[in-house]
């Protein structure tokens, strides 16, 4: 099935308004977007939940990680641990284009002067190219993370792709219970106070536990890296 647009998204969201994450994933993977769907995974503090669910549905589902060259070493180790633990082997790591880095960020310090452009160069563009062969991708976003995620729904239509948010209505309590009930390891930085983890330069410990993403770009108004934002057609 190839979803056509906004009207189809509204039908899907009405149908799955009260559904649990596994049901949303199962229907998306096995029925809606079979062989045309991937999980774009940050291997952050809560990524293990979707990875665990995928391992119980289809271990051959493509898992994509955007490696900006600025990830924490702890994130890389955690990624390796989860992939091995859950038996997920269809994994690929996507890097920014070296020619573009040499042109726009040869000294690896663009993040200091233009953090939006850095994210665009190292995450948005690589993901856009990687998703050419897919109709949809899975995101780990949740509404309790506040900001522009508060009105999140299970399905979105962003930049000609269907984005699936299986944890859209999950609570903090659900997340914690899932980790405990399924004996999943936490990210090594989680216990040190990092509740949301991205690149080293733009991630700090979270001071407000009720706002998990408060430690991301904490000295700026920026709240998203850009992969979930609608882009204007040039």
Image (spheres, rainbow, N blue to C red):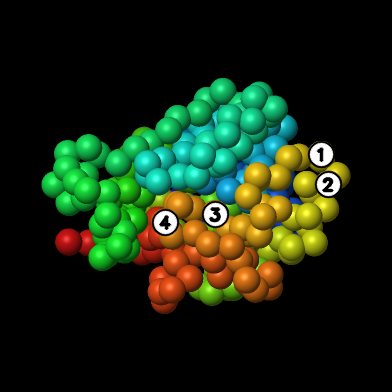
Q: Quadrant of residue 59?
A: top right
Q: CA distance from mark 4 to mark 2?
A: 30 Å
The reply to whether discs 2 and 1 touch (Cβ–Cβ < 8 Å) is yes
Q: CA distance from mark 2 to mark 1?
A: 5 Å
Q: Which mark is residue 197?
A: 3
Q: Compared to 87, does 11 lie above or below?
A: below
The residue where tag 1 is placed is 183
Q: Which mark is residue 138?
A: none
- Which residue: 71% across, 61% down? 170
- Residue 140 location (% of width, % of height): 58, 52
Specify whether 197 is left or right of 16.
left
The residue where tag 2 is placed is 180
Q: CA distance from mark 1 to mark 3?
A: 21 Å
- Determine whether the residue tagged by mark 1 lies in a helix, strand or loop: loop
- Determine whether the residue tagged by mark 2 lies in a helix, strand or loop: helix
- Residue 162 location (% of width, % of height): 46, 52
Q: CA distance from mark 2 to mark 3?
A: 20 Å
Q: CA distance from mark 3 to mark 4?
A: 11 Å
- Determine whether the residue tagged by mark 4 lies in a helix, strand or loop: loop
Nearer to us in this view, 49 or 16: 49
| Mark 3 surroundings: few (<14), some (14-19) or many (≥20) residues within 10 A | many
Counting residues from the start of the chain, the first of labels 1 and 3 encountered is 1
Q: Nearer the viewer, mark 1 or mark 3?
A: 3
Nearer to us in this view, 221 or 162: 221
Counting residues from the start of the chain, the first of labels 2 and 3 encountered is 2
Q: Residue furthest right?
A: 181
The residue where tag 4 is placed is 201
The reply to whether discs 2 and 3 touch (Cβ–Cβ < 8 Å) is no
Q: Nearer the viewer, mark 2 or mark 3?
A: 3
């Amino acid at each position: 099935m190839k979803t056509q647009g906004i009207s189809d998204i509204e039908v899907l969201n009405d149908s799955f308004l009260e559904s649990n994450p596994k049901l949303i994933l199962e229907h998306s993977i096995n029925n809606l977007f079979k062989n045309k769907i991937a999980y774009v995974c940050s291997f952050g503090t809560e990524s293990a939940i979707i990875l665990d669910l995928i391992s119980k549905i289809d271990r051959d589902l493509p898992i994509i990680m955007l490696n900006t060259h600025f990830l924490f070493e702890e994130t890389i180790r955690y990624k390796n641990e989860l992939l091995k633990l859950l038996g997920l082997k269809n994994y690929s790591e996507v890097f920014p284009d070296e020619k573009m880095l040499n042109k726009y960020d040869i000294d690896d310090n663009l993040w200091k002067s233009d953090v939006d452009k850095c994210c665009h160069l190292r995450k948005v563009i690589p993901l856009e190219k990687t998703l050419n062969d897919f109709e949809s991708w899975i995101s780990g976003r949740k509404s309790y993370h506040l900001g522009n995620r508060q009105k999140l729904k299970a399905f979105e239509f962003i930049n000609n792709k269907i984005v699936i948010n299986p944890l859209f209505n999950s609570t903090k309590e659900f997340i914690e219970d899932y980790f405990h009930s399924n004996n999943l390891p936490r990210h090594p930085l989680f216990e040190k106070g990092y509740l949301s983890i991205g690149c080293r330069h733009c991630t700090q410990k979270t001071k407000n536990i009720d706002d998990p993403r408060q430690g991301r770009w904490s000295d700026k108004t920026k709240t998203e890296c850009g992969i979930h934002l609608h882009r204007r057609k040039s």
